[in-house]
Amino acid sequence: MCRFIESIRLSEGTIQNLEYHQQRVNYAVSNYFPEHQPVELKKLLNECPLPTLGLHKIRLTYGRDVHEVKISLYVAKPIQRLKIVYDDIIDYAHKFEDRSQLSQLLLQKGEADEIIIVKNGLVTDASFANLLFKRKDQWVTPHSYLLNGTQRQFLLNQKIIEEETIRIKDFHRYEKVKLINALLERSGPEIDINRIE
């Protein structure tokens, strides 16, 4: 059975961007289980005892129904170097529980901390995050993403970032790269573009 995960930020007892997570759950369920109603995240999480101090990750595993809700303290892993890897057939349009394609690509990272996936010549995502590239005071995100992350969509809707087509040959146009996702939001480190291998 196909299963999905949803990773939700819980900061000081407050759930972040829940409506964006609900939209993604709705999209997955409507595509794979159209005869089922998607879970109502607000109702589900209101029934869970949630920590009120610190930063936590709520990890929801679901398919037709919810299989598991796990809450754990979140600590971001340090990312300083990125490795470019290539895969022209990878498909991660939904946040699948099965991450075997991504895990195989991660084996190519060598001494780097994380990967940048290039598909059909276009920059897409890291293995667990969307990417932002900085040019002067402007941040842009690749138009050719694999998974439209909730934080990515939030920043686009707020007009804080813009989309661009980005190829490796375009890297000289940018100064920094940053990884974003629901847990990191925009607090991840800015990595110099020359730290991409």
Image (tube, grey):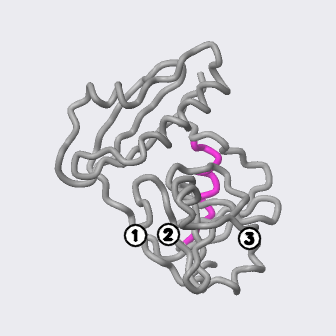
| Quadrant of image for the C terminus | bottom right
When the figure is inspected, residue 28 is found, relative to residue 99, above or below; the finding is above
- Mark 2, residue position: 113
Q: Secondary structure at mark 1?
A: loop
The residue positioned 31% from the left and 53% from the top of the image is 74
> Label 2 amino acid?
Asp
Q: Residue furthest top?
A: 35
- Mark 3, residue position: 166
Q: Secondary structure at mark 2?
A: loop
Mark 3 neighbour density, 10 Å: few (under 14) some (14–19) many (20 or more): many
> Label 3 amino acid?
Ile
Marks 1 and 3, how far apart at CA? 24 Å
Q: Start and end of the magenta stretch? A: 99-110
Discs 3/2, front = 3
Direction from residue 141 to residue 88 in the image, left or right: right
The residue positioned 43% from the left and 25% from the top of the image is 40
Q: Secondary structure at mark 3?
A: loop
* Mark sitting earlier along the chain (3/2): 2
When asked about the image quadrant of residue 166, the answer is bottom right
Q: Residue furthest left?
A: 53
1 and 2 marks in contact (CB < 8 Å): yes
Mark 2 neighbour density, 10 Å: few (under 14) some (14–19) many (20 or more): some
